[in-house]
Amino acid sequence: MSLEDRMALPIDRRTVLKAGAVAGAAAFLAACGTSGSSTNPSASNGADESPSDVLNFANWTYYIDVDEGVNTATAETSESLRRFKAEYGTSVNYQEVLLDNDEFFGTIKAPLEAGQDTGWDIVVPTTWMAKKIVDLGWAEKFNKDHMPNFVANLADEFKGRAADPSNDYLAPWQSLMTGLAVNTAKTSRFKRVNGLWEAGLKGKVVLLTELRDTVGLVMLGNGADPSAPTRATFDAAIDTLQNAISSGQVRKLAGNGYTELLISEAAYAAIAWSGDVGIIQVDKPELEFIVPEDGGMYATDNMLIPKGAQHKYTAELWIDFYYRPEIAAVVEAYVQYICPVKGAAEEITKIDATLASNPLIFPDAETKSRLKVWGDVSAEDQAYFDERFSAIVEGVGA
């Protein structure tokens, strides 16, 4: 069976999270303003070396295991969170409030600038945003004495990254491929990025509000390399996007809410994240994730403890707990992203042997060779990129 055929297979062992979870996360974020959580921090603080009663955890949607028939992860509805509570007595206040890196950063920036607790003990930004937070001095340094599993089981590819050379601030949560989601019941299956611009998809395309994912894929479609972006290749991609938007080809740019449009069939095709499509396939087996022949994007979301977090020690306990291969396998069997924990592949076979060959979790070497990581650029160029892409997002509505 080809890689593309295996990617098209629905994963029937899980129940898809409904779109209402996305809307609920957005409502929670709006209600919180600059405060990370509606749960007040307990009396413990980051200096305590005893587990706290609560751990406040901000993550993306579809990003941790939940029980069948349940839409929302809580300390009671997620096996990994239940095991953590059973071992440490800590109830995890888990909230799916990351819909977009920049949007979420806006909710924590003011308290971080003021030297105040954000309300979160763990947040999960993508590497480029995580590096920004670290460089601003707004991340807590790990005490690795509390984290032996993290030290022992972090996959080698994540050691010595430019964003965190000594692995002192960032603990990879999952890595993801960005490619195409195609509803094969509503449109022909296509393997090139420029298939998004076919006339039959007019008004039925949704793109991501994440610059590096959307512009990166459009660059690849244009024959350019997003691992070495320039103003010229960026401007060409923006021109392509603007033409697609002005013509009505693109319905919307969205954060994690793009999944709702695919589920409701308001969109037939999207620039999408691999694990999201794997989950939606349960109810929509006609939806397929495709790494384009032009190439796809590759990124990592990382657990980070914000400066001044009330429960730093407990956050370190959770990170170390997740880096036990048997716990990472429980999470991975549900989310189906690329796992950063050594030994998880062996453990996942105890849950479902077929998952060990799932290309969304364990892409083959040929697929990996087509994945690109957005390249580093000067601060001036990045500001230019951000300004031009923000104008696109604001113009079409996110």
Image (cartoon, rainbow, N blue to C red):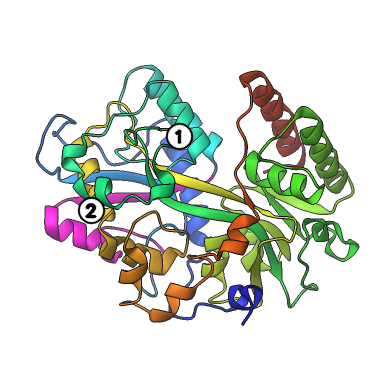
Q: Residue 274: which numbered mark, if any?
A: none
Magenta-colored span: 70-99
Magenta span contains residue 85: yes
Q: Position of residue 256 (x, y in %)?
A: 56, 52
Q: Which residue is mark 2?
A: 321
Q: Position of residue 86 (x, y in %)?
A: 14, 60
Callout 2, which amino acid? Phe
| Picture quarter with the N terminus | bottom right
Q: Which residue is mark 1?
A: 130
Q: CA distance from mark 2 to mark 1?
A: 21 Å
Callout 1, which amino acid? Ala
Residue at image coords 53%, 76%: 282
- For label 1, the SS is helix
Q: Earlier in the sequence, mark 2 or mark 1?
A: 1
| Left or right: 318, with 122 as reference point | left
Instruction: Tell me: residue 122, above or below residue 137.
Output: below
